[in-house]
């Protein structure tokens, strides 16, 4: 481990890491160190590369969100992985925490379809009527996993990859994620994170063809104190090849 980077998997074409909440995925206006820079520094040390290190960004997580992130180590891998995300061959599964719903029926499994527009100046996304200018379809599958102490642990499966998609989907049902002040939470979390975690990522390996599945357990923070989270943490970082 170098510079606090948790590596899930590395080979000649792919680097998969665990992103902590609060770290930007790529350099931004804050000037803070990013996950991309930290990963490049790890590659430079691990492989004794004195020159510039290439890592291709093929997807991102919002700054206050934690979980699994993949980078491409070659330009060929970057092109193929980008296509996998664009064509939905790469699949993501998130866990999230909200308060208990006022309407118990919201705990039932559901597929949420929305049309989203992003206000880039405010870095905020809102749901609009279908056909609105600039609107893009977003589909999210949601199911409740557990309830503890007024909190609900959810499984979220995005069928599309829109900015802030999961956060808006939850807020639209008056279930803002814990700590998500931008979308309606009433208080911040102690570490200023949002209770959204990218738990699993499966994608076709860019050169081997096999589909690999990577898992990063949720943080140890109190908001994630659920039996399922404790079990996931006991399993640690994981990678396996999916069966045909």
Image (cartoon, rainbow, N blue to C red):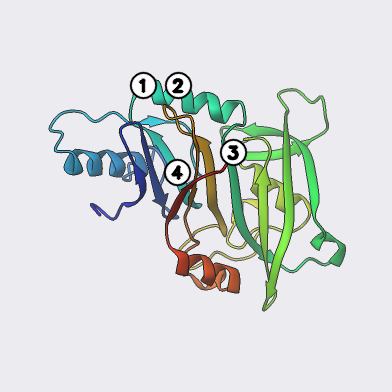
N-terminal label among 2 and 3: 2
The residue pinned by badge 1 equals 75
Question: Are discs 2 and 1 less than 8 Å apart at CB?
Answer: yes
x then y, percent, for residue 29: 39, 37
- Corner quadrant of residue 194: bottom right
Tell me the distance, in whole angstroms, between the alpha carbons under discs 2 and 4.
16 Å
The residue at the point 43 percent across, 30 percent down is 208
The residue at the point 41 percent across, 51 percent down is 18
> Which mark is nearer the camera, 3 or 4?
3
Numbered label attached to residue 69? 4
Numbered label attached to residue 244? 3
Q: Secondary structure at mark 1?
A: helix
x then y, percent, for residue 216: 47, 55
Residue 232 is left or right of residue 177, and the answer is left
Residue 171 is left or right of residue 20, and the answer is right
- Corner quadrant of residue 177: bottom right
The residue pinned by badge 2 equals 79
Residue 9 is left or right of residue 137, and the answer is left
The quadrant in which the C terminus is found is top right
x then y, percent, for residue 70: 43, 39
Using the image as rendered, state which of residue 159 and residue 196 is in the foreground: 159
């Amino acid at each position: 481990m170098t510079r606090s980077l948790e590596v899930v998997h590395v080979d000649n074409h792919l680097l998969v890491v665990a992103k902590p909440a609060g770290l930007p995925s790529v350099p931004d206006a804050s000037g803070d160190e990013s996950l991309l820079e930290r990963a490049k520094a790890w590659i430079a040390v691990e492989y004794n590369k004195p020159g510039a290190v290439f890592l291709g960004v093929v997807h991102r997580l919002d700054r206050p969100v934690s979980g699994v992130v993949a980078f491409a180590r070659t330009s060929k891998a970057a092109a193929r992985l980008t296509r996998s995300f664009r064509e939905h061959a790469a699949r993501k599964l998130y866990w999230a925490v909200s308060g208990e719903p006022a309407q118990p029926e919201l705990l039932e499994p559901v597929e949420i379809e929305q049309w989203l527009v992003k206000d880039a100046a405010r870095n905020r996304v809102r749901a609009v009527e279908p056909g609105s200018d600039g609107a893009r379809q977003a589909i999210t599958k949601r199911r409740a996993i557990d309830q503890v102490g007024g909190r609900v642990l959810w499984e979220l499966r995005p069928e599309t990859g829109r900015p802030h998609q999961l956060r808006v989907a939850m807020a639209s049902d008056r279930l803002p994620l814990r700590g998500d002040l931008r979308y309606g939470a009433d208080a911040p979390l102690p570490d200023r994170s949002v209770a959204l975690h990218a738990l699993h990522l499966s994608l076709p390996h860019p050169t081997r063809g096999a589909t690999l599945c990577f898992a990063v357990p949720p943080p140890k923070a109190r908001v994630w104190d659920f039996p399922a989270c404790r079990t996931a943490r006991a399993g640690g970082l994981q990678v396996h090849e999916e069966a045909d």
